[in-house]
Amino acid sequence: MAGGHLDIDLDAIVANWRALDALSAPEVETGVTIKADAYGLGAGPVAEALAEAGAGRFFIAQAEEGEAIREAVGPGPLVYVYSGHMEGDTEAIGDLGLIPVLNSIEQMTRHFERLPRHPFAIQLDTGMNRLGMEPAEWLAVRDLVIQQRPHFVMSHLACADEPEHPMNARQLALFRELTEGLSVPRSLAATGGILLGPEYHFDITRPGIGLYGGLPFEDARPVVVLSLPVIQTRSLEPGETVGYANTWEAEVPTRLATVSAGYADGLMRALSNRAMLFADGVPCPLVGRVSMDLITVDITHLDRDPETLEILCPEQSIDDLAAAADTIGYEILTALGNRYTRRYRRSEK
Protein backbone atom coordinates (compact mmCIF):
# COMPACT_ATOMS: atom_id res chain seq x y z
CA MET A 1 0.00 0.00 0.00
CA ALA A 2 1.83 3.10 -1.24
CA GLY A 3 -0.64 5.73 -0.06
CA GLY A 4 -3.23 6.23 2.63
CA HIS A 5 -6.83 5.04 2.57
CA LEU A 6 -9.67 7.47 3.21
CA ASP A 7 -12.81 5.51 4.11
CA ILE A 8 -16.02 7.53 3.70
CA ASP A 9 -19.24 6.25 5.24
CA LEU A 10 -22.01 7.42 2.92
CA ASP A 11 -24.65 5.93 5.20
CA ALA A 12 -23.35 8.12 8.04
CA ILE A 13 -23.70 11.21 5.81
CA VAL A 14 -27.27 10.23 4.98
CA ALA A 15 -28.02 9.57 8.67
CA ASN A 16 -26.66 13.00 9.61
CA TRP A 17 -28.82 14.63 6.93
CA ARG A 18 -31.90 12.85 8.24
CA ALA A 19 -31.07 13.79 11.82
CA LEU A 20 -30.70 17.47 10.92
CA ASP A 21 -33.90 17.28 8.88
CA ALA A 22 -35.72 15.89 11.92
CA LEU A 23 -34.77 18.97 13.96
CA SER A 24 -37.11 21.18 11.93
CA ALA A 25 -40.83 21.04 11.21
CA PRO A 26 -42.10 18.73 8.44
CA GLU A 27 -42.91 21.66 6.19
CA VAL A 28 -39.28 22.88 6.30
CA GLU A 29 -37.22 21.40 3.46
CA THR A 30 -33.67 20.33 4.30
CA GLY A 31 -31.22 20.87 1.47
CA VAL A 32 -27.58 19.85 1.12
CA THR A 33 -24.53 22.11 0.96
CA ILE A 34 -22.09 20.09 -1.12
CA LYS A 35 -19.59 22.71 -2.22
CA ALA A 36 -15.81 22.19 -2.36
CA ASP A 37 -16.20 18.62 -3.64
CA ALA A 38 -18.53 17.75 -0.74
CA TYR A 39 -16.09 19.28 1.75
CA GLY A 40 -13.29 17.21 0.22
CA LEU A 41 -15.09 13.85 0.35
CA GLY A 42 -16.21 13.52 -3.28
CA ALA A 43 -19.22 15.42 -4.61
CA GLY A 44 -20.40 12.68 -6.97
CA PRO A 45 -20.77 9.76 -4.55
CA VAL A 46 -22.05 11.99 -1.75
CA ALA A 47 -24.64 13.68 -3.95
CA GLU A 48 -25.84 10.35 -5.34
CA ALA A 49 -26.32 8.90 -1.84
CA LEU A 50 -28.21 11.95 -0.59
CA ALA A 51 -30.41 12.14 -3.68
CA GLU A 52 -31.34 8.49 -3.21
CA ALA A 53 -32.25 9.34 0.39
CA GLY A 54 -34.62 12.08 -0.80
CA ALA A 55 -32.59 15.28 -0.84
CA GLY A 56 -33.92 17.57 -3.56
CA ARG A 57 -31.90 20.78 -3.22
CA PHE A 58 -28.13 20.90 -3.55
CA PHE A 59 -25.98 24.00 -2.94
CA ILE A 60 -22.55 24.52 -4.52
CA ALA A 61 -20.13 27.44 -4.39
CA GLN A 62 -19.29 27.88 -8.07
CA ALA A 63 -20.92 26.97 -11.36
CA GLU A 64 -17.88 24.85 -12.27
CA GLU A 65 -18.90 22.42 -9.52
CA GLY A 66 -22.26 21.79 -11.14
CA GLU A 67 -21.22 19.20 -13.70
CA ALA A 68 -20.18 16.62 -11.08
CA ILE A 69 -23.47 17.09 -9.22
CA ARG A 70 -25.58 16.78 -12.35
CA GLU A 71 -23.75 13.61 -13.40
CA ALA A 72 -24.49 12.12 -9.98
CA VAL A 73 -28.11 13.14 -9.44
CA GLY A 74 -29.50 13.63 -12.95
CA PRO A 75 -31.79 16.44 -14.09
CA GLY A 76 -34.39 16.28 -11.33
CA PRO A 77 -32.88 17.79 -8.16
CA LEU A 78 -32.39 21.55 -7.91
CA VAL A 79 -28.76 22.73 -7.88
CA TYR A 80 -28.05 26.26 -6.60
CA VAL A 81 -24.86 28.29 -7.03
CA TYR A 82 -24.00 30.45 -4.00
CA SER A 83 -21.67 32.73 -5.98
CA GLY A 84 -24.52 33.66 -8.30
CA HIS A 85 -24.29 34.40 -12.02
CA MET A 86 -20.71 35.47 -12.57
CA GLU A 87 -19.16 36.56 -15.84
CA GLY A 88 -18.44 33.40 -17.82
CA ASP A 89 -21.08 31.29 -16.01
CA THR A 90 -23.96 31.69 -18.47
CA GLU A 91 -23.29 28.57 -20.54
CA ALA A 92 -22.83 26.29 -17.52
CA ILE A 93 -25.91 27.67 -15.78
CA GLY A 94 -28.03 27.20 -18.88
CA ASP A 95 -26.69 23.85 -20.05
CA LEU A 96 -26.64 22.19 -16.61
CA GLY A 97 -29.86 23.72 -15.35
CA LEU A 98 -28.14 25.41 -12.41
CA ILE A 99 -29.93 28.08 -10.38
CA PRO A 100 -27.79 31.07 -9.42
CA VAL A 101 -28.26 32.77 -6.05
CA LEU A 102 -27.96 36.37 -7.23
CA ASN A 103 -25.91 38.61 -4.95
CA SER A 104 -26.09 42.05 -6.55
CA ILE A 105 -27.96 44.22 -9.02
CA GLU A 106 -25.08 43.61 -11.43
CA GLN A 107 -25.69 39.86 -11.25
CA MET A 108 -29.44 40.37 -11.58
CA THR A 109 -28.96 42.41 -14.72
CA ARG A 110 -26.60 39.83 -16.22
CA HIS A 111 -28.97 36.98 -15.41
CA PHE A 112 -32.16 38.62 -16.69
CA GLU A 113 -30.48 39.75 -19.92
CA ARG A 114 -28.62 36.55 -20.78
CA LEU A 115 -31.00 33.90 -19.44
CA PRO A 116 -34.45 35.45 -19.36
CA ARG A 117 -37.07 33.29 -17.61
CA HIS A 118 -34.31 31.06 -16.18
CA PRO A 119 -34.90 30.41 -12.45
CA PHE A 120 -32.89 32.18 -9.78
CA ALA A 121 -32.73 32.87 -6.04
CA ILE A 122 -31.61 35.93 -4.07
CA GLN A 123 -29.07 36.35 -1.29
CA LEU A 124 -29.22 39.28 1.14
CA ASP A 125 -26.38 40.51 3.31
CA THR A 126 -27.59 40.81 6.90
CA GLY A 127 -24.24 41.57 8.48
CA MET A 128 -21.55 39.12 7.36
CA ASN A 129 -20.40 41.55 4.64
CA ARG A 130 -19.32 38.78 2.33
CA LEU A 131 -21.98 37.97 -0.28
CA GLY A 132 -25.47 39.29 -0.88
CA MET A 133 -27.37 42.46 -1.66
CA GLU A 134 -27.10 45.29 0.85
CA PRO A 135 -30.39 46.23 2.57
CA ALA A 136 -30.78 49.56 0.75
CA GLU A 137 -29.98 47.95 -2.60
CA TRP A 138 -32.52 45.21 -1.94
CA LEU A 139 -35.30 47.53 -0.85
CA ALA A 140 -34.86 49.53 -4.06
CA VAL A 141 -35.57 46.51 -6.27
CA ARG A 142 -37.49 44.19 -3.97
CA ASP A 143 -40.94 44.58 -5.52
CA LEU A 144 -39.61 44.18 -9.04
CA VAL A 145 -37.59 41.09 -8.12
CA ILE A 146 -40.44 39.38 -6.29
CA GLN A 147 -42.60 39.74 -9.40
CA GLN A 148 -40.06 37.49 -11.15
CA ARG A 149 -40.75 34.74 -8.56
CA PRO A 150 -37.32 33.80 -7.21
CA HIS A 151 -37.05 30.27 -5.83
CA PHE A 152 -36.27 31.74 -2.40
CA VAL A 153 -34.59 34.61 -0.60
CA MET A 154 -31.71 33.69 1.72
CA SER A 155 -29.05 35.08 3.99
CA HIS A 156 -26.20 33.51 5.94
CA LEU A 157 -25.41 33.66 9.66
CA ALA A 158 -21.95 34.79 10.72
CA CYS A 159 -21.89 33.44 14.28
CA ALA A 160 -24.30 30.49 14.34
CA ASP A 161 -21.62 28.24 15.87
CA GLU A 162 -21.85 30.45 18.98
CA PRO A 163 -25.50 30.18 20.10
CA GLU A 164 -25.29 33.05 22.61
CA HIS A 165 -23.63 35.50 20.24
CA PRO A 166 -25.80 38.63 19.84
CA MET A 167 -25.06 38.70 16.11
CA ASN A 168 -27.47 35.80 15.60
CA ALA A 169 -30.46 37.73 16.92
CA ARG A 170 -29.43 40.88 15.00
CA GLN A 171 -29.22 39.03 11.71
CA LEU A 172 -32.49 37.23 12.35
CA ALA A 173 -34.27 40.51 13.06
CA LEU A 174 -32.87 42.19 9.93
CA PHE A 175 -33.68 39.18 7.75
CA ARG A 176 -37.27 39.23 9.00
CA GLU A 177 -37.48 42.97 8.35
CA LEU A 178 -36.14 42.67 4.80
CA THR A 179 -38.36 39.72 3.87
CA GLU A 180 -41.56 40.44 5.80
CA GLY A 181 -44.65 39.77 3.70
CA LEU A 182 -42.87 38.04 0.85
CA SER A 183 -44.76 35.34 -1.00
CA VAL A 184 -41.62 33.29 -1.74
CA PRO A 185 -39.75 30.84 0.50
CA ARG A 186 -37.00 32.04 2.83
CA SER A 187 -33.76 30.43 4.00
CA LEU A 188 -31.36 31.48 6.75
CA ALA A 189 -29.97 28.40 8.51
CA ALA A 190 -27.04 26.14 7.71
CA THR A 191 -25.93 23.54 10.29
CA GLY A 192 -25.43 26.02 13.13
CA GLY A 193 -28.62 27.86 12.33
CA ILE A 194 -30.63 24.63 12.43
CA LEU A 195 -29.33 24.03 15.95
CA LEU A 196 -30.33 27.55 17.05
CA GLY A 197 -33.97 26.54 16.88
CA PRO A 198 -37.20 26.83 14.86
CA GLU A 199 -37.25 30.62 14.55
CA TYR A 200 -34.15 30.37 12.34
CA HIS A 201 -35.46 27.60 10.07
CA PHE A 202 -37.97 29.43 7.83
CA ASP A 203 -38.77 27.33 4.72
CA ILE A 204 -35.45 25.82 3.59
CA THR A 205 -32.33 24.86 5.55
CA ARG A 206 -28.89 24.27 4.02
CA PRO A 207 -26.73 22.05 6.29
CA GLY A 208 -23.11 21.53 5.38
CA ILE A 209 -20.45 20.57 7.95
CA GLY A 210 -22.91 18.67 10.12
CA LEU A 211 -23.52 16.23 7.27
CA TYR A 212 -19.83 15.37 7.21
CA GLY A 213 -19.45 14.69 10.93
CA GLY A 214 -18.30 18.09 12.15
CA LEU A 215 -19.18 20.56 14.88
CA PRO A 216 -21.37 22.27 15.87
CA PHE A 217 -23.54 19.17 15.30
CA GLU A 218 -22.35 17.21 18.32
CA ASP A 219 -24.69 14.28 17.61
CA ALA A 220 -23.29 13.69 14.12
CA ARG A 221 -22.19 10.20 13.21
CA PRO A 222 -18.48 10.00 12.29
CA VAL A 223 -18.02 9.89 8.53
CA VAL A 224 -14.31 9.37 7.77
CA VAL A 225 -11.45 7.10 8.75
CA LEU A 226 -8.00 8.01 7.42
CA SER A 227 -5.51 5.16 7.58
CA LEU A 228 -1.85 5.78 6.71
CA PRO A 229 0.82 3.20 5.84
CA VAL A 230 4.01 2.80 7.82
CA ILE A 231 6.97 2.81 5.44
CA GLN A 232 9.78 2.10 7.87
CA THR A 233 10.50 1.65 11.58
CA ARG A 234 13.71 2.38 13.45
CA SER A 235 15.16 2.52 16.94
CA LEU A 236 16.61 5.72 18.43
CA GLU A 237 18.98 6.18 21.32
CA PRO A 238 18.54 9.00 23.86
CA GLY A 239 19.76 12.27 22.42
CA GLU A 240 18.96 11.46 18.79
CA THR A 241 16.74 13.96 17.00
CA VAL A 242 13.94 13.61 14.48
CA GLY A 243 13.01 15.54 11.35
CA TYR A 244 13.76 18.98 10.00
CA ALA A 245 15.29 21.50 12.43
CA ASN A 246 15.71 18.83 15.17
CA THR A 247 12.46 19.86 16.85
CA TRP A 248 12.10 16.57 18.78
CA GLU A 249 14.76 14.72 20.74
CA ALA A 250 14.49 11.23 22.20
CA GLU A 251 14.86 11.24 25.97
CA VAL A 252 14.75 7.45 26.29
CA PRO A 253 15.28 4.54 23.87
CA THR A 254 12.54 5.08 21.28
CA ARG A 255 10.87 3.12 18.52
CA LEU A 256 9.88 5.33 15.61
CA ALA A 257 7.53 4.77 12.64
CA THR A 258 7.88 6.76 9.42
CA VAL A 259 4.43 7.22 7.89
CA SER A 260 3.51 8.00 4.29
CA ALA A 261 1.64 11.33 4.50
CA GLY A 262 2.50 14.99 4.93
CA TYR A 263 1.36 18.48 4.21
CA ALA A 264 0.99 17.62 0.52
CA ASP A 265 -1.79 15.30 1.71
CA GLY A 266 -3.51 17.89 3.88
CA LEU A 267 -1.75 17.13 7.18
CA MET A 268 -0.93 20.66 8.20
CA ARG A 269 2.53 21.60 9.38
CA ALA A 270 0.90 23.03 12.50
CA LEU A 271 0.34 19.42 13.62
CA SER A 272 4.10 19.02 14.17
CA ASN A 273 4.83 17.63 17.66
CA ARG A 274 1.14 18.02 18.54
CA ALA A 275 -1.06 15.46 16.78
CA MET A 276 -1.87 11.88 17.70
CA LEU A 277 -2.20 8.83 15.50
CA PHE A 278 -3.80 5.57 16.62
CA ALA A 279 -2.88 1.89 16.40
CA ASP A 280 -5.96 -0.22 17.18
CA GLY A 281 -7.22 2.60 19.39
CA VAL A 282 -3.89 3.20 21.17
CA PRO A 283 -2.66 6.82 20.84
CA CYS A 284 0.80 7.39 19.38
CA PRO A 285 2.27 10.91 19.30
CA LEU A 286 3.45 12.55 16.10
CA VAL A 287 7.03 13.66 16.76
CA GLY A 288 9.15 16.03 14.75
CA ARG A 289 7.96 18.25 11.96
CA VAL A 290 5.35 17.34 9.38
CA SER A 291 7.17 17.35 6.05
CA MET A 292 5.79 17.28 2.53
CA ASP A 293 5.25 13.52 2.23
CA LEU A 294 6.20 12.05 5.61
CA ILE A 295 5.50 12.17 9.32
CA THR A 296 7.22 10.34 12.17
CA VAL A 297 5.36 8.73 15.06
CA ASP A 298 6.51 7.42 18.45
CA ILE A 299 5.42 3.76 18.72
CA THR A 300 7.70 2.79 21.63
CA HIS A 301 4.81 1.72 23.83
CA LEU A 302 3.25 -0.66 21.28
CA ASP A 303 3.87 -4.41 21.55
CA ARG A 304 4.49 -4.70 17.81
CA ASP A 305 5.32 -2.51 14.83
CA PRO A 306 2.07 -1.52 13.07
CA GLU A 307 1.56 -1.69 9.32
CA THR A 308 -0.79 1.30 9.40
CA LEU A 309 -1.77 4.13 11.75
CA GLU A 310 -5.02 6.07 11.77
CA ILE A 311 -5.19 9.85 12.13
CA LEU A 312 -8.97 10.23 11.63
CA CYS A 313 -10.90 7.49 13.40
CA PRO A 314 -13.45 6.89 16.16
CA GLU A 315 -10.83 7.97 18.72
CA GLN A 316 -10.02 11.24 16.90
CA SER A 317 -12.63 13.25 15.01
CA ILE A 318 -11.99 15.94 12.45
CA ASP A 319 -12.54 18.53 15.18
CA ASP A 320 -10.14 16.80 17.59
CA LEU A 321 -7.46 16.92 14.91
CA ALA A 322 -8.39 20.50 14.11
CA ALA A 323 -7.88 21.49 17.74
CA ALA A 324 -4.32 20.17 17.57
CA ALA A 325 -3.67 22.46 14.60
CA ASP A 326 -5.54 25.47 16.01
CA THR A 327 -8.00 25.37 13.13
CA ILE A 328 -11.51 24.06 12.38
CA GLY A 329 -12.88 20.77 11.12
CA TYR A 330 -13.86 22.37 7.80
CA GLU A 331 -10.20 22.99 6.99
CA ILE A 332 -9.15 19.47 7.97
CA LEU A 333 -11.67 17.92 5.57
CA THR A 334 -11.24 20.27 2.62
CA ALA A 335 -7.42 20.06 2.84
CA LEU A 336 -7.32 16.30 2.34
CA GLY A 337 -5.12 15.64 -0.67
CA ASN A 338 -5.93 13.65 -3.79
CA ARG A 339 -3.27 11.02 -3.18
CA TYR A 340 -5.46 9.00 -0.82
CA THR A 341 -7.37 6.01 -2.14
CA ARG A 342 -11.00 6.84 -1.39
CA ARG A 343 -13.24 3.95 -0.40
CA TYR A 344 -16.98 4.55 -0.09
CA ARG A 345 -19.06 2.39 2.23
CA ARG A 346 -22.79 1.75 1.90
CA SER A 347 -23.55 -0.80 4.61
CA GLU A 348 -27.30 -0.32 4.24
CA LYS A 349 -27.42 -1.11 0.49
Image (spheres, rainbow, N blue to C red):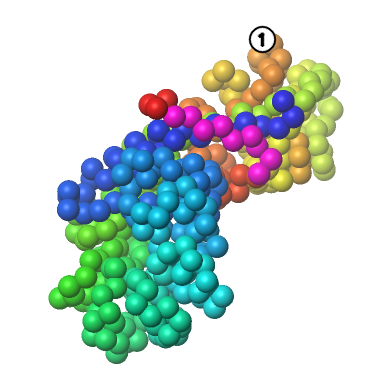
Residue 338 spot, x, y in % from top left: 66, 44
Residue displayed at 66% across by 32% down: 4
Residue 152 spot, x, y in % from top left: 28, 68
Residue displayed at 37% across by 74% down: 118
Query: In this orientation, which residue lies closer to the viewer: 349 or 174?
Result: 349
**Residue closest to the far left:** 181
Residue 315 part of the magenta segment = no
Residue 303 spot, x, y in % from top left: 66, 10
Chain part drawn in magenta: 338-346
Read off the residue under disc 1: 303
**Residue closest to the far top:** 303
Residue 281 spot, x, y in % from top left: 54, 20
Badge 1 amino acid: Asp
- Mark yes or no: residue 243 visible: yes
- Which quarter of the figure has residue 144? bottom left
Provide the secondary structure element on which disc 1 rests: loop
**Residue closest to the far bottom:** 140
Residue displayed at 19% across by 59% down: 199
